[in-house]
């Protein structure tokens, strides 16, 4: 019985660690950031429904809060918003500032294209067009 419990705990730990290391888009923001508010209105309201969000879900971090341990290695965050694409605990790239909706999607899709292929197809939703216009 103890062996079964230990195996179940090991399985759970491996799966949780693996999912925590998947790709994510980290948005560094501040409560008084006007451009963060503009991003929220123009992109934030639809982001979770996009192919890009399926590939790299959004995680919001206030720059004035203590930095989570898993993001200690992310340096040089001076402006908000700053979007950092992470994969397996490593920074893939970043977008500093908010350049407007169409430029944001173009820049984000450029970063997502740097991610390793997800299975046989790197797109989150094969055959569908992502919000930024890239056909998967």
Image (cartoon, rainbow, N blue to C red):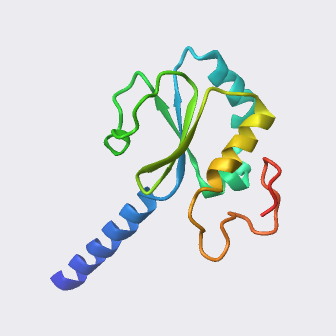
Q: Hey, which quadrant is residue 37 in on the image?
A: top right
Residue 136 visible in the snapshot = yes
The relative height of residue 26 versus residue 114 in the rendered view (above or below) is: above
Q: Which residue lies at the image location 38% right of the left edge and 63% below the top edge? A: 16
The relative height of residue 120 versus residue 77 in the rendered view (above or below) is: below
**In the figure, is residue 114 to the left or right of 14?**
right
Picture quarter with the N terminus: bottom left
Q: Hey, which quadrant is residue 124 in on the image?
A: bottom right
**In the figure, is residue 123 to the left or right of 86?**
right
**In the figure, is residue 5 to the left or right of 85?**
left
Q: Which residue lies at the image location 33% right of the left edge and 75% below the top edge? A: 11
Q: Residue furthest left?
A: 2
Q: Which residue lies at the image location 54% right of the left edge and 44% below the top edge? A: 93
How far across and down, in percent of the image, does residue 103 sit?
Answer: 76, 35
How far across and down, in percent of the image, does residue 18 sit?
Answer: 41, 65
Picture quarter with the C terminus: bottom right
Residue 48 visible in the snapshot = no
Which of 7 and 26 lies nearest the eye of the viewer?
26
**In the figure, is residue 119 to the left or right of 109?**
left
How far across and down, in percent of the image, does residue 42 sit?
Answer: 76, 31
The number of numbered discs placed on residues in the rendered structure image is: 0
The relative height of residue 119 versus residue 123 in the rendered view (above or below) is: below
How far across and down, in percent of the image, does residue 15 sit?
Answer: 39, 69
Q: Which residue lies at the image location 62% right of the left edge and 57% below the top edge? A: 55
């Amino acid at each position: 019985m103890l062996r079964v419990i230990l195996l179940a705990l090991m399985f759970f730990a491996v799966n949780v660690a693996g999912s925590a290391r998947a790709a994510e888009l980290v948005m560094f923001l501040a409560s008084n950031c006007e451009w963060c508010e503009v991003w929220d209105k123009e992109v934030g309201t639809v982001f979770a429904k996009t192919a890009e969000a399926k590939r790299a879900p959004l995680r919001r971090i206030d720059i004035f809060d203590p930095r989570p341990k898993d993001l200690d290695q992310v340096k040089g965050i001076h402006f908000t918003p700053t979007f950092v694409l992470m994969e397996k605990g490593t920074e893939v790239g970043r977008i500093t500032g908010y350049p407007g909706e169409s430029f944001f999607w173009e820049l984000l899709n450029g970063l997502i294209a740097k991610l390793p292929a997800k299975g046989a197809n790197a797109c989150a939703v094969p055959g569908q067009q992502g919000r930024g216009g890239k056909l998967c």
